Image (spheres, rainbow, N blue to C red):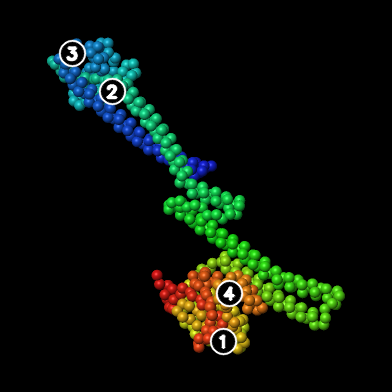
């Protein structure tokens, strides 16, 4: 019930302040109530002891001369702030003239009847004022009757002290609750400052699309939350940059085949009206359109693959790289039937996405086939956890080597060859997503002479499959 009330239309800062105030109020109520009850019991016990001692002394005086009540008078009793009544076992009472009468009850009569023990209780005088009443047995000289001396004292001073204590506890508790509420609000405001910054940052991002990180203070839970949020912002910023770069590059690369297609189609349309094309030109244009359509399809498929790999993260599974490379080699042999493949594979196992890794190996082998001469040789071998693919093509210059994995990058030697310029980007993305690396350098023949390009893929794997399941 309280939890639902706290959650209704209240901020976290308000809830913390209210909870702090309620906690202090409960503590004050319990502590103050316990202190008040302890003080009341202590005051009443002290008063009972005083009255019992005074009753014993007074009973000794009265027992010698009951008719004159031991010479006691109203002035003496008022000075002592007490009232006295002598009660007999049959309930009859003797009073001191001029003194307020007490309401004698069964407890006091029982003390007189038994002639032993004592009683103490809170009662009233004849005028209704509260008294603390104590009774002790009393023996009267030369009388077989049993009596009890009943003595009472007004509770007005004690009640006044307890009321003052109640006021003090109330005022102190109220101040404590107020201070606790203020302190709770201040602590909540200070503690929630990073959360407020996060909220403001989210609002700023929503309004302006700016992914600026937030200043981190401290190493507590909120500090770690801020760091996690900053990591998310950096990831979003990087993803947005990649997306914008991909869109910009794609629009640039798509413009050329689309322009060429449009030009060729316009020529064909114009030829339908005017017959302007010379014999054989129409067939050449159609062949050009078919080739451009293949190039355009390859480019779009590669773009879709890059966009998909940026977003999709499959559950890792055991991957046998020997099998992956063998499948990729089957495709490469079909694309380059006149090329010789020298293959030397070794066991290599890792946890990952077999489809992504096979696509990367296929792209590397396709690249080697594309740049190899018709009677060339492509060598594929493994050293430890590294996979080497070397061709006998023109190779890659030192200036181009750092850029070949960039999206849409085409070196001077490859500008006239078919391709989207995305194949090696897909390779790098797939290998990096598995915690591996890919690099390229000049290949060399066994005699040390320069050959084409050699790509080296290094993956975090193991020679034995069972090692994948070891803790």
Residue ID for mark 1? 377
Q: Which mark is residue 70?
A: 3
Element under disc 3: helix
Could you tell whether 66 is left or right of 159 in the image? Answer: left
The quadrant holding residue 469 is bottom left
Task: From the viewer's side, name the closer residue of 397 and 12.
Answer: 397
Which callout, 4 or 3, points at the residue further toward the start of the chain?
3
Which callout, 4 or 1, points at the residue further toward the start of the chain?
1
For the point 67% across and 66% down, the residue is: 251
Question: Is residue 212 among what the camera can see?
Answer: yes
Residue ID for mark 4? 400
| Quarter of the image that includes the C terminus | bottom left
Element under disc 1: strand
Residue furthest toward the front?
399
Do the residues under discs 3 and 1 have CB atoms within 8 angstroms?
no
Residue ID for mark 2? 132
Q: Residues within 10 Å of mark 2 (few under 14, many from 20)?
A: many
């Amino acid at each position: 019930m309280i939890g639902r009330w706290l959650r209704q239309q209240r901020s976290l800062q308000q809830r913390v302040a209210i909870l702090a105030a309620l906690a202090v109020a409960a503590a004050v109520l319990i502590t103050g109530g316990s202190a008040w009850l302890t003080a009341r019991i202590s005051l009443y016990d002290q008063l009972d002891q005083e009255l019992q001692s005074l009753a014993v002394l007074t009973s000794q005086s009265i027992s010698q001369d009951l008719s004159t009540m031991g010479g006691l008078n109203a002035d003496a009793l008022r000075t002592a702030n007490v009232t006295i009544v002598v009660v007999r076992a049959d309930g009859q009472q003797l009073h001191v003239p001029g003194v307020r009468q007490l309401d004698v009850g069964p407890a006091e009569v029982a003390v007189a009847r038994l002639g032993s023990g004592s009683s103490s209780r809170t009662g009233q005088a004849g005028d209704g004022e509260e008294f603390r009443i104590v009774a002790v047995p009393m023996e009267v000289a030369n009388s077989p009757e049993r009596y009890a001396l009943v003595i009472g004292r007004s509770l007005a001073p004690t009640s006044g002290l307890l009321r003052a204590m109640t006021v003090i506890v109330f005022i102190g508790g109220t101040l404590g609750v107020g201070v606790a509420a203020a302190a709770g609000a201040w602590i909540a405001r200070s503690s929630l400052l990073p959360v407020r910054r996060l909220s403001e940052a989210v609002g700023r991002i929503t309004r302006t699309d700016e992914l600026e990180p937030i200043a981190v203070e401290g190493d507590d839970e909120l500090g770690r939350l801020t760091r996690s949020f900053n990591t998310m912002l950096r990831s979003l910023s990087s993803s947005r940059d990649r997306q914008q770069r991909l869109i910009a590059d794609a629009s640039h690369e798509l413009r050329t085949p689309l322009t060429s297609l449009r030009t060729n189609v316009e020529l064909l349309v114009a030829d339908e009206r005017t017959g302007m094309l010379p014999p054989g030109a129409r067939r050449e244009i159609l062949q050009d359109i078919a080739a451009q359509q293949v190039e355009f399809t390859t480019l779009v498929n590669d773009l879709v693959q890059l966009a998909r790999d940026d977003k999709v993260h499959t559950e890792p599974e055991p991957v046998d790289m020997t099998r992956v490379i063998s499948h990729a080699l089957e495709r490469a042999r079909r694309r380059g039937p006149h090329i010789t493949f020298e293959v030397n594979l070794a066991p290599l196992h890792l946890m990952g996405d077999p489809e992504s890794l096979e696509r990367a190996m296929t792209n590397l082998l396709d690249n080697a086939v594309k740049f190899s001469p018709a009677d060339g040789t492509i060598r594929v071998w493994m050293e430890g956890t590294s996979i080497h693919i070397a061709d006998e093509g023109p190779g890659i210059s030192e200036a181009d080597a750092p850029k070949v994995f960039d999206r849409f990058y085409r070196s001077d030697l490859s500008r006239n060859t078919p391709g989207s310029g995305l194949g090696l980007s897909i390779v790098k993305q797939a290998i990096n997503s598995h915690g591996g690396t890919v690099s390229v350098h000049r290949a060399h023949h066994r005699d040390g002479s320069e050959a084409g390009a050699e790509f080296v893929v290094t993956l975090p794997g193991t020679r034995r499959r069972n090692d994948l399941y070891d803790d």
